[in-house]
Image (tube, rainbow, N blue to C red):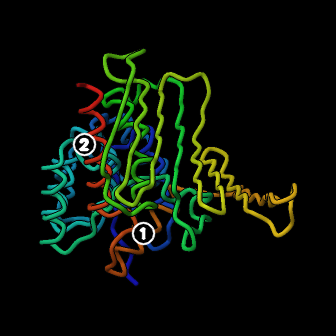
Amino acid sequence: MQSLRCAVIGVGYLGKFHAQKYAALPECELVAVVDSNPVQAQAVAEANQTRAVADYRELLGQVDAVSIVVPTRLHFEVARDFLAAGTHVLVEKPITVTLDEADALIRLAREKDVRLMVGHLERFNAALLGLDLTQDKPLFIESHRLAPFNPRANDVSVVLDLMIHDIDIILDIVDSEVERIDAKGVTVLTSDTDIANARLTFKSGCVANVTASRASLKVERKMRMFMPNCYVSVDFQNRVLAKHRKGEREMFPGVPEIVSEESVFENGDALMAEIKHFVACVRQGREPLCSGQAGRRALATATEITRLLKS
């Protein structure tokens, strides 16, 4: 098959890794990398044997697919221009700043019959991919996403920076309408919320307690799910999936034993898995795992949490 002509728009900290992945895929041709910083663009271009471009508009109509890894406030404008040109788009999370912008991108992708995917990277974490919930749906979910402060991501609140990862995963797993949201937050290091907790109550009866902090001294990315006969822990940071189930024997009279099983996924490359999935969806004309609609759903919940925190 003919190579897919690809480009990466924004090659800062995360974008340069997108460029590396496209350059390594035999089915892709990395046509160019784009950045407003010419020194950064040239460095990434040379490292990946491609060319540097200062203005993304030069590539409109010249590429088949792009990763958009620019600041969130620019997501809508850049994604809109490429979608309008008939280009398939992988845009980093959150999909846009507002729901109206997200809706506009979803409509445009549908009109142009191109794929729109949102880069919720944790969907492709090997530990999560190893989880099978076809038999049981969680009744209670608890997640903690803690990180030290990083000035690179201070253009959005901790909800849109960190918590939205877990919001997206939980919404996908529970697959039920959110009935009620309660939220509390604290400003610590910036003028925006740095530590937040949200409690999501779903119409199905499931409850999710979600905590995110960018003012922590340690890194932790864990999610725990409780089912009637099983407890599952997903450690995103270390790519460990642990399952604890009722056994056939008794631990005490009338109390079943707990049988534990742990899987460690040592060689997972979530970003490569994400980009391979995007490329496959483009080639096969199928809807991505994290579609524009899924990105919009996560943004809607995160936006409501943000509103509650500010009120």
Residue lying at 38% horizontally and 48% vertically, measured from the top left:
201
**Residue 203 x %, y %:** 34, 57
Q: Nearer the viewer, residue 142 or 83?
A: 142
Would residue 56 appear left or right of 173 to someone viewing this image? left
Residue under pointer 1: 28
Image spot of residue 167 (x, y percent): 40, 48
Q: Is residue 135 left or right of residue 114?
A: right
56 to 172, vertically: above or below: above
For image coordinates 45% across by 68% down, the residue present is 277
Q: Please provide percent x and percent y for residue 6.
A: 34, 63
**In the picture shown, does residue 65 fall above or below 35?**
below
Name the amino acid type tagged 1: Cys
> Which quadrant of the rendered structure holds the C terminus?
top left
Estimate how packed mark 2 is, as few (under 14), some (14 to 19) or many (20 or more) residues with alpha carbons within 10 Å: some
Answer yes or no: do the residues labelled 1 and 2 have beta carbons within 8 Å?
Answer: no
Circle 2 sits on which residue?
Answer: 54
- Residue found 25% across the figure and 25% down from its top: 310
